[in-house]
């Protein structure tokens, strides 16, 4: 147990050190990039620093596999140089037994990262995108999904229009059970429209079976309401704006993801991308364990054997290969070419099996 605790402590020290170093590098690079993107006259240094710190948790969460494999390489190379690994093997410890403590440590940290780090990254990502949009003057999201249905927002200098629909197609451009609420620039309601369906066309919404209430000029809006078989409403929305307003699945906390998936499906949208992301997040601790095994598979050897640089390079290449396959499987899963569970869980399991076979062959074979 003491040896397990010692190796776990060495791994935790290497992991935290690598985390701090990469975090500092990221903050500096992202700060330079933010200064280039935003107008320095309108956005001061304090604002840029705040944006950089908001964006840091997202990127640090994304590069956790890289941090883990670098920490593993550092730890086992240092154990090999000090001959501690030779002494451990001479005492009868197998390679797999030695890996229990770092693998368990990174698995527990992966659980903590998913349960706590994921919500923090999602919250800071949302705030970063909102503040960055304000600095750029591009406005916020035009679409929102709730238990009441789909909500859209459009507007210009003449006022704003809020659109609520019971259901939508996958693209958000064909709505059913639609209600339009138009507001003047001073915030007062001017028009209400209810329609059976609404389809987005270039520059306008095409409504069917519409009923229009004039809330601004009519003394009795209900008595003066007019019904139309077809009715057109001007719009500055595009299909690309609506699609982009969904945001990335990574901007939603893993604790809120099941409810958001149910709301998406109830509103008529495809939730496949969010389902794939949800299961990939659940599989993250196993993928981090795979990074430990990959790093150990090439460095659990004495330095007198030589070729240390080649072994480190091979470990990094195998780690990046596993990361690429995982992302490729995510794309296939989002496009519906492979099942969701297959896309999320097979890459980390395969990434664990490959270095396990290598360790059994080279170290205990």
Image (tube, grey):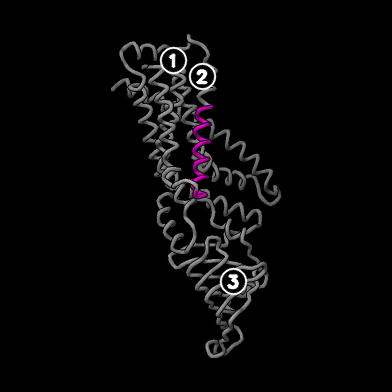
Q: Which residue is mark 3?
A: 161
Q: Give the residue at x 57% y 36%.
A: 26
Cα distance in 3D space between marks 2 and 3 = 61 Å
Residue at numbered disc 2: 311
Question: Seen from this angle, which residue lies furthest left?
Answer: 1
Alpha-carbon span between mark 1 and mark 3: 67 Å
For the residue pair 292 and 114, the one nearer the viewer reads as: 292
- Vertical side of 344 occupied by 25: above or below: above
Q: Position of residue 258 (x, y in %)?
A: 40, 54
Residue ID at (56%, 70%): 162
Q: Nearer the viewer, mark 2 or mark 3?
A: 2
x and y percentages locating residue 110 in the rendered image? 40, 37
Above or below — where is 183 with respect to 5? below
Q: Tell me whether the residue at label 1 lies in contact with that at label 3, contact meaning CB atoms closer than 8 angstroms.
A: no
The crowd level at tag 1 (other Cα within 10 Å; few <14, some 14-19, many 20+) is many
Please report the bounds of the magenta region as a residue range: 317-336
Whichever of callouts 2 and 1 sits on the residue coming sooner in the sequence is: 1
Label whose residue precedes the other's in the sequence (2 or 3)? 3
Instruction: Please tell me the numbered disc located at residue 301.
Output: 1
Q: Callout 2 environment at 10 Å: few (<14), some (14 to 19), or many (20+)?
A: some
């Amino acid at each position: 147990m003491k040896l397990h605790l010692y190796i776990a402590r060495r791994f935790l020290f290497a992991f935290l050190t690598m985390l701090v170093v990469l975090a500092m590098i990221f903050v500096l690079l992202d700060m330079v990039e933010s200064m280039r993107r935003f107008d320095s006259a309108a956005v001061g240094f304090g604002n840029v620093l705040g944006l950089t710190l908001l964006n840091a948790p997202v990127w640090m969460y994304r590069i956790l596999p890289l941090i883990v494999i670098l920490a593993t390489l550092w730890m086992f190379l240092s154990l090999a140089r000090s001959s501690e690994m030779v002494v451990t093997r001479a005492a009868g410890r197998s390679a797999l037994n030695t890996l229990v403590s770092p693998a368990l440590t990174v698995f527990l940290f992966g659980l903590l990262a998913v349960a706590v780090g994921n919500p923090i990254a999602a919250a800071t990502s949302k705030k970063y995108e909102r503040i960055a949009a304000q600095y750029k003057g591009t406005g916020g999201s035009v679409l929102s999904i709730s238990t009441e249905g789909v909500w859209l927002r459009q507007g210009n200098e003449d006022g704003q229009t809020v659109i609520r629909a019971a259901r939508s197609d996958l693209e958000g451009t064909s709505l059913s059970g639609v209600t339009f609420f138009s507001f003047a620039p001073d915030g007062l309601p001017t028009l209400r429209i209810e329609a059976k369906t609404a389809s987005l066309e270039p520059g306008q919404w095409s409504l069917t079976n519409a009923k229009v209430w004039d809330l601004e000029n009519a003394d009795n809006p209900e008595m003066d309401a007019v019904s139309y078989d077809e009715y057109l409403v001007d719009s500055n929305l595009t299909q690309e704006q609506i699609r982009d307003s969904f945001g990335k699945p990574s901007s939603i906390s893993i604790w809120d993801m099941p409810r958001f998936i149910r709301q998406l499906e109830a509103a008529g949208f495809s939730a496949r991308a969010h389902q794939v992301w949800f299961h990939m997040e659940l599989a993250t601790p196993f993928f981090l364990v795979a990074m430990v095994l990959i790093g150990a598979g090439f460095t659990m050897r004495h330095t007198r054997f030589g070729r240390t640089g080649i072994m480190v390079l091979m470990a990094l290449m195998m780690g990046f290969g596993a990361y690429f396959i995982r992302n490729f499987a995510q794309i296939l899963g989002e496009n519906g070419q492979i099942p969701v569970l297959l896309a999320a869980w097979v890459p980390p399991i395969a990434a664990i099996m490959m270095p396990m076979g290598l360790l059994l062959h080279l170290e205990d074979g």
